[in-house]
Image (cartoon, rainbow, N blue to C red):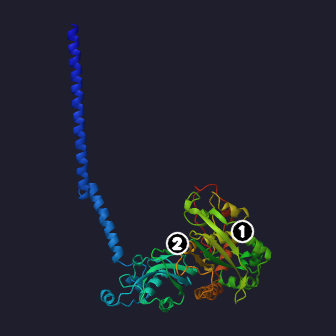
Amino acid sequence: AGAGAGAGAGAAAANANEGNLDTGGSTSKKNKSTAFDYFKRKRKQQRGEGEKGEKKKNIRKKFKGDKEAANTIPNKGSYADPEMCKLFGVTVEKRTDDTEAEAAVKFPKKKVAMLVAFIGEQYSGFQINPGVKSIQAEMDLALYRAGYLSERNFGFPHKYSWSNSARTDKGVHACCQVVSCWLQMPTTNMDEIRENINNVLPDDIAVLDICRTTRNFCARTQRDRVRYMYMLPSFLLQDTDDFRKLCESKGCHENGREAKDPISDEEIQDLLPEMVKFRASAGQLDKLKQALSVYNGTHRFHNFTQGMRWSDSNSKRYIESFDVLDPVVGDDGLEWIPTLVFGQSFLLNQIRKMVSLAIDSARGAAPTSAMEDSMEKRIMRISIAPAQGLFLDMSFFGAYNEKKKPDQPLDWTSQESPAVKRWRRFKEDRVMTHIMTEETKQHNFLRYIYGQEYHFERERYLPLPSEEEVKKPESKVGE
């Protein structure tokens, strides 16, 4: 009996082992089948078969089509596009076949940096954009007309590696915008090239200098610091109570118009003589200096641009200095205060909002705590100062000059070269004079300060408790 029981147990164990072996074998076959199906599906996807394969094929086709379009269809904001020429009445002269021309004479291409200055009143910013006039589109056309761009590169900025050190807003001027690109160089005389380009540029744009650079130089990524100037008329610093009393004495303190049209031309003419006579006192200048100095250092400027939160890393900016220079008087007798802000980079509308808040703080329209609160983890509604007073003053490439040690350093501040003289002359005789003359004709700053006084809600300077508050639409006064 014992032997029989032992034999039965052994048989059961054998059967169990056999079952285990069978199970393992079927699992192995199943794994092999799964692996085979996987590679079979991958081959189908590569051939473009199946649902995922079709999706990948469409993505590759779209990418290839976009790449081909980028190399065959000119930028919609360039005058190489017929619609742009028709819209602005520009005639582009066609050349002979590029292939035959280059076969006859082949000019070497060189990487250069150009120092560009312009009056931005007639343009919708520097960057090329469809349907609007831009500085880049004018430069693209001038380089083609002067013979430094081939016909097949005209209208394709990426083909000649176009890059600019800054992007200026609509109506903003510049004395030191630096652009880098590859140009056909029939001569090594940079002054001759500069003059040829200027001859075909509009009167409000000028190339002040051209320098050879290294092959990999990029004006956008290798600019390490930048300086802007904002000019404001002294009457903006008039105490808020004094300004209200003046408006009441002229009978222009009440009207039913909207914030976009806060004051009539007749009322402006009544106020203008008092604005021209106004001179900022030492105490008012000190208040402005004190307000602007709060921005110095590294802070989060989420309240000084659009669509940004305190937690966004991009909101952090370093301001090296924000100085107030000695006042100057224009030909019409109006006193102006130039300010210089020096930093690494700036957000959209940041400088104009910084100036607006500092002015309101200096004239007593904003609490002194508003300056510090604006950079804390809170939401604050800040108005925007007019674009007409802002211009790009200087771009700096210190790290590039130190590391690469080029034959022509990109430095327009340390020596009195012919290019520096051209820069200073354009700044003082063209840009600063234009700002003063423009205010005499348009009165943008007087409209702005009136809107700040009678239409801007000062409760906006009281910070909201958190970033999650629903944003209200900003006042359009001064834009």
Q: Quadrant of residue 173?
A: bottom right
- The residue under the point 58% across, 73% down is 398
Label 1 crowding class (10 Å Cα cut-off): few <14, some 14-19, many 20+? many
Looking at the image, is 12 positioned above or below residue 212? above
The image's mark for residue 222 is 2
Q: Quadrant of residue 463?
A: bottom right
Dot 2: element: helix
Q: Is residue 327 visible?
A: yes
- Identify the amino acid type marked 1: Ala
Where is residue 83? Give x, y as percent. 39, 82
Where is residue 387? Give x, y as percent. 60, 77
- Identify the amino acid type marked 2: Gln
The CA span between labels 2 and 1 is: 31 Å
Label 2 crowding class (10 Å Cα cut-off): few <14, some 14-19, many 20+? some
Looking at the image, is 94 positioned above or below residue 398? below
Quarter in which the N terminus is drawn: top left
The image's mark for residue 291 is 1
